[in-house]
Image (cartoon, coloured by chain):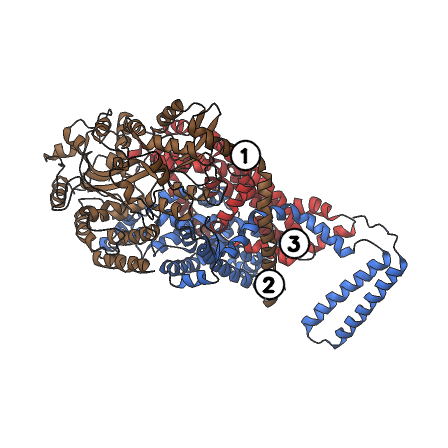
Chain colours: A red, B brown, C blue
Amino acid sequence: MRTKSQNRKIAKAILYVVLLFIAFLMLVPFAWMLSSSLKLDKDVFIVPIQWIPENPQWSNYVKIWTKIPLAKFVLNTAKLTIIVTLLQLFTSSFAAYAFAKLNFRHKNTLFLAYVATIAVPWQVYMVPQFMMMRSFGLNDTHLAIICLQAFSAFGVFMMRQFYQGIPDELCEAARIDGMSEYQIYGRIMLPLSKPALSTLTIFTFVNTWNDFLGPLIYLKTESKKTLQIGLRMFIGQNSSEYGLIMAASVLSLLPVLIVFLSLQKYFVEGIAATGVKG
Amino acid sequence: MKKKFLGLTLAASMAAASLAGCGGSADTAATAADSEETAAVEAGDGAEETAAAEAASSEEVTLKWSVWDISLTTYYEPLIEAFEAAHPGVTVEMIDLGSSDYQTVLATELTGSGSDFDVVCVKDVPGYTTLVNKGVLEPLDDLIAQDGIDLSMYGGITDQVKVDDKLYELPFRSDFWVLFYNKDIFDAAGVEYPTNDMTFEEYDALARSVANTEPGQEVYGAHYHTWRSAVQLFGILDGKNSIVGGNYDFTKPYYEMVLKEQQDGVCQDYATLKTSSLHYSGAFSQGNVAMMNMGSWFIPTLIEKISAGEYTECTNWGIAKYPHAEGVEPGSTLATITSLAIPTSAPNKDLAWEFVKFVTGEEGAEIIASTGSIPATMNDDIAAMVASVEGFPGDEASREALQTANLYLEMPVHAKSSEIETILNEAHDGIMTESITIDEGIAQMNEKVGALLAE
Amino acid sequence: MAAKNRTVDPDVVQQKLAKLNLQLKELEGQMEKATDPRKRRKLIAKITAVEEKIKQAKTGERMTRQQRRDLIAYSFIAPNFIGFAVFTLGPVIFAFILAFLEWDGNNPIQFVGISNFLDMAGNSRFIASFKNTIVYCIATVPLTLAAAIGLAVILNQKIKGRNFFRTVSFFPYVASLVAVAAVWNMLFSPAKSGPVNMLLYTIFKVPANELPKWAASPDWVMFTIVLFSVWKNMGYYMVIYLAGLQGINAELYEAASLDGAGTLQKFRYITWPQLQPTTFFVTIILTINCFKVYDIVYMLAGGSNGVLSESAIVLVYHIYEEAFRNWNLGYASAVAMVLFLLVLAVTLIQFRGEKKYAN
């Protein structure tokens, strides 16, 4: 008995060591980023690395707001990201419900159309898409980015995958109780799909927040640009101002981190045994 | 399996059919939906084309001009101000397409119909060739003849950008490569500054004489940025070889020189520079680079950064003419031009031409020179203007270095320039990281470019 | 879906019914003869459809039940599908048609048949990119999958600082690529004094002249890229696995514990099979994302001019350079078609796998 509990302790200890090592691997680059963001440009690449700068340049974090219209960029990006995420969540889960739980004509064909487009890199249809958007008068508008991002096949695919894990009997029972499909979706499926929805939220949020090429092609007016283009523009113009670049990168990371942290907590609490089978 | 495949192809073809219909109707729908805009543009078109040329009438016109790096470039604003002052009622609006992907975004913008740019900057020659091949630029020859513009003021560079004997752009900036050097390093080593008349042997010896390979206190005698132009193109300065000719044996002595320097620690390791993406300005500003060959566009940057107090290790700098091969006239160097062009879809073509004429002509040149940048129309007066900009090195040799003899484009106009560029870059990369030998690299270039040209 | 009774001419209804009944008889006759199970299934479907129609004709309803169901289903799909069809599917299909055309975006389009596909065979950059993409996928998919599932299983245990570790593992995924790629290039600097190389030199005693040049060397560049991809993306897939793990019924583990199963056995007989749907999903997404890799390679191996050499080029980059540097939109679309077929093959194989698990 004793050896067993000892074994367990040793196993736990090893586990923690492994975890700490992984955490270290994960964090090193970020530590570097953070430490560089507090350095003078010329000190950034000096070897051996000075992890805690002797003379931290907090002013980098002040300067970056005046060097580029960062506040405007953040606002634009936040607006786009929130709208896209909401649209994506709503329309994907709606459509995915039909694909997972309803039988209808052309179901497989329509679904294959979705799956097939996941496989096509955006670069392939970027030009026809741009020409189409422009002919709709959407060039240089935020609406273009929203249309571009909000109806992704990925969301539908993911949500369908999740709904398929929910037993059909649940829906059948509700149908016998006289619920309409809309009621089943709203009252049974949606509450059950919180874990999947939060996962999709994280993914959509991250993708939209970090998207670069889309805004680059569609947004030209400075006041409409997003954070990533702003960052890239800044890097292009001041490629050797590493301190400022890193400070801006750290700032651009924060919102995504906050979204993840808040949803992650929810993740853990919310996925109690609700009959959901991954 | 089979059934699914069938179903899929069926779906695809059905959707294709519906798209074909869709595409057509989308176009018409779009024109209908956009009719307001188009109508406005067309109305503008008709009215301006006749009116604007005669006199800048009271009518309000906006010229859309695509540029990059508005906040970094000091001459855009004064150019626009001067033009607007001479043309009442005209506003010039700049659209910043970003510098790193400028040509890509511009080409996308001008693809199909519906772009409303009046004047576009063309950043490099491959980008220019692309646009000309796509047929989206107006040929300027008739306009040039009609207004009697003397192309000789561009020093022959316009002849090098003719495509099928037609000119589609006029240069307003013409940067050429010079040797930047850090006087402090030469002073500390007790070595004479680089001169305006050095052969490559002398240059190599000079670089070695100031280099310090002691770990921790490295001084690099020379610095070559990771662009292939920085090494490969030493070879075309004798005027006998072409970078699109298909034979690259002439690059060998220069690769040998630079690789030897790299192995001896006289210059920084290419592989390291490449992966760290160290910017040339970052390298030079660290104060441990004695000489760096770079384009004259670095002059205004240096002046500005030093006066802003950002560069403290290279405040005492100078420029010298490019080193040259035995028997070649000093001052032969590489050139990169930045030009203006008018898209075929431009709504206000006549006014756009006025603007192009203004920026690329004398007046524009003076404004550009007064900010420390090198305009395309170069003469003694303009060179003097550049040299008199505050922060420009005061010594006579640096002023003299602004006089060029023969200018060779970094990449001449060629229908396959971007494909050739890719092949040359690949070989350059291989040679400089020493993953292939110089001979292998040259053989690779000869073979692949040869095959491409034979197509 | 109000199904109102209509006032219809009874004769017409009778005629219709007679016709339908005849069809039904015929189908039933075929059914008796048919032996092939697949054919039988088809016939059953047809019979049901005809029966529905008969019912509809009898009751005089405007729509059959199936039609009403279809409408409801379409109303669910429509908000997403309309946007998707207009902004994604349309351009995608157009791009596929382009594969058989020659077009630079401005000059008139020309039909060239399959010559775009034939051109690929002679293009050394295409061949290199095809090979590299496959190599990249084969290396990255299993590694990422293993890392993700391992992490998820560990981080699903009740351990201290669980949330911290979860967040940390997810960190690389959310970070802006531009920034982390710069950091990696620094850490894996090809110089002998680069941090990782110093580590190899001092601790693992790798001789100085054998130190890898990482992204700058043709032999190591793919390895560096794979390493970076696994590091950057495993957090993403871990999250999906975590969601999957949360769905496994805890009673299963309790029962297994009672039967005396060890950790490994539990993983093998409960966790792994229960995670099959998740693994299916992750493998598809991961494989597709691997085939679509572009920005990572570009950032790590592109250097200052952003041109990839043949040792690092991947399919999407090849598409990109052909489309936007050389404006061969037709050829680029043809390469995309190849990419698409690759992914489609993987997806179909996976779909079959899923069916097997479901049964």
Q: How crowded is mark 1: few (under 14 residues within 10 Å), some or many (20 or more)?
A: some
Question: Which residue is label 1 attached to?
Answer: A79
Q: At 71% across and 76% down in the image, what residue appears? A: C35
User: Amino acid under label 2?
Assistant: Tyr
Q: In this view, does A29 lie above or below C201?
A: above
Q: Can residue C2 be seen in this view?
A: yes
Q: Is residue A278 visible?
A: no
Quarter of the image where one finds residue C181: top left
Q: Please give the chain letter of the residue carrying mark 3.
A: A
Label 3 residue SS: helix
Q: At 74% across and 66% down in the image, what residue appears? A: C46
Quarter of the image where one finds residue A238: top left
Q: In this view, does B320 lie above or below B12?
A: above
Residue A100 - label: 3
Q: In which quarter of the image is the C terminus of chain C?
A: bottom right
Circle nearer the viewer, 1 or 3: 1
Label 1 residue SS: helix
Marks 2 and 3 belong to one chain: no
Marks 2 and 1 belong to one chain: no
Q: How crowded is mark 3: few (under 14 residues within 10 Å), some or many (20 or more)?
A: some
Q: At 28% across and 31% down in the image, what residue appears? A: B373
Question: Which residue is label 2 attached to?
Answer: C357
Q: At 21% across and 39% down in the image, what residue appears? A: B292
Query: Which of B429/B199 is in front?
Result: B199
